[in-house]
Amino acid sequence: MIAPAAWMRDDEGESRLLVVEGEALHVARIRDLPRCVGDGDVVVVNDAATLPASLRVESEGRAFELRLLTVDVVTGRLHGVLFGEGDHRTRTEHRPPPPEHVSWLRFGEVVARVVHREGRLVELEAAPSGDALVAALYAHGRPVQYAHVPEPLPLWAVQTPYASRPWALEMPSAGRALSVSVLTAIRSRGATVARLTHAAGLSATGDPTLDARLPLAERYEIPVETVRALEGARRVIAIGTSVVRALEDSAARHGQVSSGCATATLRLSATTPRRAVDAVLTGVHEKGTSHAELLRAFVSEAVLDRALDRADALGLLGHELGDFLWVVGEEGRARLARSGRAA
């Protein structure tokens, strides 16, 4: 079983990198990542900043937790998952259920009316909205985190080096690898760095039935300049599973990656044809998770299982603060699909 990282390394360049290319596996350091890219490659990052999406809320004298799934500050519409008493130090699956009957909840000066509820899933209408709602989120929210990281994480610790718009509910954690020096080295090798914004969602909800549906629908936006960069790419490399999901969802909708906003509903697996992405940098995730399932769209079950077993044997650390996998998909499959020669 892959052990989770319990805190950030002082030197992220020392994080280990397990390279998975065909049948070959070898171990490097994340500072060696630029050697994996070359002239004509397009490296796509998720520039979403991470919101403080865990809120201690109150209703009729009871305190519990709301972890946000979506935020529309203009309308005040929120979607989230409710948890009973406790905090992140208790494993998610061991948290008690939330109160059965909740018609409203409060955090700070914001009162949110329950519009719809399905088990732990809840849709809310918050007032005030707009800037006042944003201020309340940052004043009263904390980053979502899990029991394997016992000490509270400050908000700065869950941001990537190039974080921009606050869309992500959990950190797009593969982006931790791309320090300024690594990005500079990638560009020096002739690769282009492009961006999109994807609202990376929750990794776990504590409800096995709901967890089986992860990842839930997540919004994304792909800029025109990113689509232009992809058109002549030798390879398209995704930094994180959120980038894979956005690009592949767009390609599945339109036949090719297109610019604009949409909501990703595609769940990638071994049966999903890749149309856009050739390789992915991601964290080390256990077998059976939605992240690991997505990687089966790149390599066979046997190869991925062998890679994860190797990661375990070498003591690579998992989850959002851990080590990394570099997974190159079956050669030519996505490239042919982009050119229109394969479905």
Image (cartoon, grey):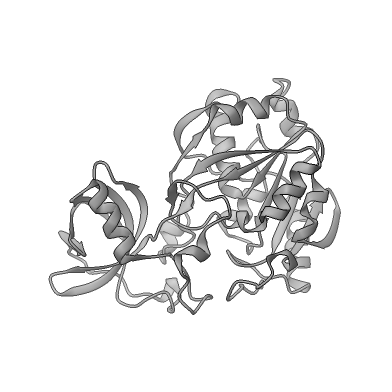
Along the viewing direction, whichever of 86 and 29 lies nearer the viewer: 29
Q: Looking at this rendering, what residue extends furthest in the top direction? A: 340
Please report the residue visible at 49 percent of the width from the left and 79 percent of the height from the top.
150
Query: Position of 217 compared to 271: left or right?
Result: left
Query: Position of 187 compared to 265: left or right?
Result: right
30 lies above or below 83:
above
Where is residue 141? Give x, y as percent: 34, 64
Please report the residue visible at 67 percent of the width from the left and 57 percent of the height from the top.
177
Please report the residue visible at 82 percent of the width from the left and 40 percent of the height from the top.
38
Where is residue 176? Give x, y as percent: 62, 58
91 lies above or below 230:
below
Using the rendered image of the protein, determine whether residue 247 is visible from the camera's viewpoint. Answer: yes
Along the viewing direction, whichever of 193 and 87 lies nearer the viewer: 193
Query: Position of 127 compared to 146: left or right?
Result: left
Placement of the N terminus among the 4 image quadrants? bottom right
Along the viewing direction, whichever of 304 and 194 lies nearer the viewer: 194
Where is residue 112? Give x, y as percent: 19, 55
Where is residue 308? Give x, y as percent: 73, 63
